Amino acid sequence: MLRAKLEASELRHEVKELRSVVAQYQRELKESNTLLLKQRLPPRPHTNSTEKQLIAAGQYWKCAGGEDCPLKRLTPGGVFDQSLYIIDHDLPWSASGKHVGNRRALCVWCESVKTRREVAEGRHRPASSGEESEEG
């Protein structure tokens, strides 16, 4: 009987040690998760209409798309007006995290083709409800 009590006491001690180890791992995991969440990309900054116009004007109101751009066939040089362009990231924002210097004006058709290509290649992350739209 004494031996059983001694074994039970040892087992209780081991369980207590295991619980403290598990509690320590839980604290470390919580700390790691907190650090990981801080390393995520910040919310996408808002691009106001003045910035959008400056980007488009910097391109002389021409689509930055490739030679397949229908505007380049329809208008001299592919020039668009304010209703026919979207400000888009050159490299996907979700991959680069860069906003400044990573934007260009595309016509609606070229932006649609680029986005569909990125979706097909798995490189496009759609804007969540907390992120601003880039439409011009």
Image (cartoon, grey):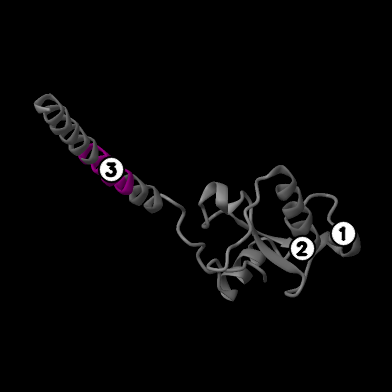
Specify few, some or many for label 3: CA neighbours under 10 Å numbering under 14, 14-19, or 20 or more: few
Q: Residue furthest front?
A: 1
Residue 32 in the image: state x and y as whole percent.
33, 44
Specify few, some or many for label 1: CA neighbours under 10 Å numbering under 14, 14-19, or 20 or more: some
CA–CA distance between discs 2 and 3?
49 Å
* 69 relative position to 34: left or right: right
CA–CA distance between discs 3 and 1?
56 Å
Residue 15 in the image: state x and y as whole percent.
22, 36
* 39 relative position to 59: left or right: left
Q: Are marks 1 and 2 in contact (CB under 8 Å)?
A: yes
- Secondary structure of the residue carrying tag 2 is strand
Question: Which is more toward the observer, 29 or 8?
Answer: 8
State the extent of the magenta-drawn residues as a range.
Answer: 20-31
User: Is-magenta flag for residue 12?
Assistant: no
Task: Kindly identify the residue that appears in the image at 56 percent across and 73 percent down.
Answer: 48
Task: Kindly identify the residue that appears in the image at 59 percent across and 75 percent down.
Answer: 49
* 13 relative position to 36: left or right: left
Task: Kindly identify the residue that appears in the image at 61 percent across and 49 percent down.
Answer: 91
